[in-house]
Amino acid sequence: MNFRLLYPIQPLKKYIRYFWMLESRSNTAEEKSFKIMTDGIPGMIFQQHPEAFRDHYHQQLPSLFLYGPKTQYANMQVKGTFLNVGVSFQSAILTDIFPITTHDLTNQFIGLDELMRTSLEEQLLYATTFEQKVQLLERFFIQRLKKNHRSDGKAGWAIQLLQQGKTLPQVQSALHVSERTLERYFKHHIGVTPKMYARICRFQSTLELIRQSNFGSLTAVAHLQQYFDQAHFIKEFQLFAGASPKHFLRKAHEQLPNFAEWSS
């Protein structure tokens, strides 16, 4: 498989983490299995060959679709040739670009043509290179941002505080909001509750340690990440990754972060 990554132009860095491309020119009929691990981040995917991928329920996905944050892992199967180009958004910005609340997309996807009239799918289909497709996407997002109302930024600030290790009461205090208001902000802009987002942040921090082999033992990882005990750590990891930490180390192959090909 061929994997490529491009970072957005400066005006879009606040909204987009990166653009990616994953391509395979396989002629084999063998089906490959992927696990999408939980990262709390929404995205958008264009499929040059939409017949190649099947979702958790073996249904074909749209050619161009948005997806919301996940609260647990998901399986995908792929067969034959494919070329997918994706957008990994920053958290808490989906409502700045699209006419939808992030909570409506949690654990869901929607074809872009169901949200708005646009020729973007056709333009992407006929663009011949990854760079050309990214330029089309950037132009589309710039135009969308000119039309849409911006959020007040509190949700993004709350995310930064949680990623810095602040507790939820500390986040509430810093933003001068009640627990209920904070939960409402998270559901609307981020798609999950503050507690769920904090759990996902801890999982992603744990996953990064494991990816880099930056740990003495899995027990040490559980202790370092402040899981209640080893059993809780493994259960949480299985929920978000679809496998135990040991199985992840043995079976998972990541080219695209959080989208691991799974060996049998």
Image: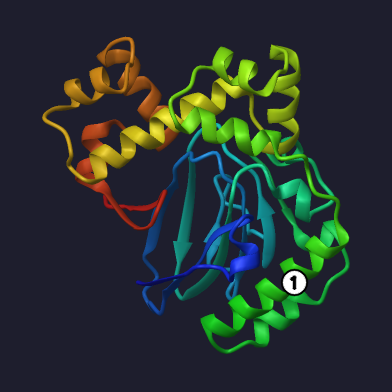
> Which residue is pictured at 87% across the width and 62% down the height?
147
Say above or below: 213 vs 228. below
Left or right of 224, for residue 68: right
**Residue 45 placement: quadrant:** bottom right
| Residue, disc 1 | 140
Q: How is the image coloured?
A: rainbow
In the rendering, at what x and y percent does residue 152 appear? 77, 39
Residue under the image location 55 percent in, 24 percent down: 196
Side (left or right) of 78 relative to 95: left
Q: Position of residue 230 (x, y in %)?
A: 25, 15
* Relative vertical location of residue 42 with respect to residue 226 in this rendering, above or below: below
Report which quarter residue 194 is drawn in: top right
Percent position of residue 207, x then y: 32, 38
Q: Residue at x 65, y 66 (%)?
A: 11
Quick check: 247 above or below 5? above
In front of the other: 79 or 202? 202
Where in the figure is residue 117, as x and y percent of width and height?
88, 68
In the rendered image, is residue 242 in sight? no
**Circle 1 sits in a helix, a strand or a loop, which is it?**
helix
